[in-house]
Image: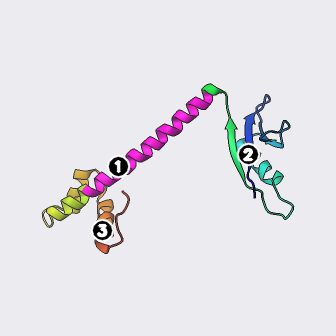
Amino acid sequence: MEREVIVLRLGAAGDWEATIFGQAEPMCGGSNLARCRAGIRRALISPDGGRRPWDERVELPAALAEVVEAARREREAALEQQRRSQDATQVAVFRLAEELMGKLAMRDIARLVGVSHQRVQQVLAHQFSGRGAATL
């Protein structure tokens, strides 16, 4: 089944309008994106009762689209940095526990690494149970 491309635009009155790409007249609208999307779902019911799939494209003025895209890029970069930080923290917990076994308490490892002692326990339990690495 071919996917429709739905273009969402903020109308002059402040409501969202949804238009099938290439058509002039809006198919539905709503006071917010959630209501507009609900209208899209209702409008795209196929003859067999199923819903036709669609891809969504939100159109904003260029300056606002740029700000939104910059925010998305920063969130993605922050998530990647968080993953690297979690990996580095895990390595530190494992190395401290392994190399100073019996010399450091879990609370000491936690303070050194900057996580809770409960989190250190979870990470080590995952490591030693063979279930793989836990996410910090």
User: What amino acid type should be assigned to the residue bearing mark 3?
Assistant: Gln
Residue 75 is left or right of residue 28, and the answer is: left
Q: Residue at (85%, 65%) from the top-left corner?
A: 48
Residue most extreme to the front: 2
Range of the magenta residues? 64-91
| Residue 18 part of the magenta segment | no
From the image, tell me which residue sits under label 2: 5
Q: Where is residue 85 in the image (x, y as percent from the top left)?
A: 33, 49
Kindly identify which residue carries mark 1: 84
Q: Name the residue under label 3.
A: 127
Residue in view at x 78 percent, y 32 percent = 11
The answer to whether marks 1 and 2 mark residues whose Cβ atoms lie closer than 8 Å is: no
CA gap, disc 2 and disc 3: 46 Å
Callout 1: 10 Å neighbours few (<14), some, many (20+)?
few
Q: Does the magenta run of residues contain 88?
A: yes
- Residue, far bottom: 129
